[in-house]
Image: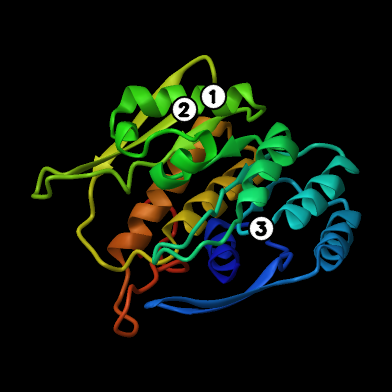
Amino acid sequence: MQADLKTFVAMGVYGASVVTAITAQNGSGVHETLSLPPESVAAQLRAVLADGLCDAGKVGMLGNAPTVRAVADELRRVAPFPLVVDPVVQSSSGARLLDDGGVQALLEELLPRTTLLTPNLDELAVLTRRDREALEAPRERIAAAEQLIGAGASAVLVKGGHAATSGGDDARVLDLLHDGARTHRLENPRIDTRHTHGTGCVLSAAIAAGLALGLPLLAAVERGRAHLQAALRLAVPIGPGVSPVNHALARWGGAR
């Protein structure tokens, strides 16, 4: 959530937050999580939406099925707006952050409200019950994205950062944006850094910011990717673990 708010500032929009869980974490991993009562999550979201000023939304860690349903119920009470859903199933260190019931609730309750779903390959495997190794092939990623669109999502951005790579100066990252009718291949050189904490949060928040500013989906995704690449290039070491990207100084698309 802190990464989201920093990203919103850098992207030129104002962010309002709803806390779903409290985590004890640092660059070495997630050490403990405490989910808030679904009623509290719903009350927070209801209060934020009551102002009627939400131009776009971003959903991150939800934790469990009751929280997913609480969020979905509140969203159904208001007029639709662009919604980016980052399906946070587990942390980069391997801690599980959405239980099996929550995964099913996300697919049934939240996916039909989703403008863009942003899974990495590990999350894509869980959501579609496909073999993770098979998803190394781009054609399998597109098939999985089509499955999720068939389940209700308007579009899916399959992130390729977790794909296997041979390394070296020619290593590339391939993201695939699929909207059911067309697939956009978005590729860039892989940035060699260990400072990657928060990449998924930053990308989904940056895309949501672009949608809030009225950009078309592809343009919002391209702008968000440019911001993340700058945030990775400008990251600095903080502590002995995996440091966060530089959320605030990246300014979409270029170093400052």
Specify the amino acid type for callout 2. Ala
Q: Residues within 10 Å of mark 3 (few under 14, many from 20)?
A: many
Horizontal side of 1 relative to 156 (left or right) equals: right
Cα–Cα span, label 1 and label 2: 5 Å
Which residue shows up at 47% across the image and 47% down it?
224
Q: Label 2's element? A: helix
Name the image quarter holding residue 194: bottom left
Q: Which numbered circle lies on residue 147?
A: 1
List x then y, in percent, for residue 30. Answer: 48, 74
Local crowd at mark 1 within 10 Å, few (<14), some, or many (≥20)? some
Looking at marks 3 and 1 on the same chain, the residue that comes earlier in the sequence is marked by 3
**Residue occupying the point 68% across, 61% down:** 14
Do tag 1 and tag 2 residues touch (Cβ < 8 Å)? Answer: yes
Total tally of numbered discs in the picture? 3
Residue 126 visible in the shown view: yes
User: Between residues 93 and 190, which one lies in front from this camera angle?
Assistant: 93
How far apart in space, not on screen, are marks 2 and 3 (Cα)?
Answer: 22 Å
How many C-alpha atoms fall within 10 Å of the one at disc 2: few (<14), some, or many (≥20)? many
Residue 144 is tagged as 2
Q: Earlier in the sequence, mark 2 or mark 3?
A: 3
Residue at horizontal 45 percent and vertical 66 percent from the top: 247
In this rendering, the answer to whether 251 lies above or below 239 is above
**Residue that label 3 marks:** 62
From the viewer's side, name the closer residue of 242 and 92.
92
**Location of the N terminus (image quadrant):** bottom right
Label 1: state its secondary structure. Answer: helix
Residue farthest along the bottom direction in this orientation: 239
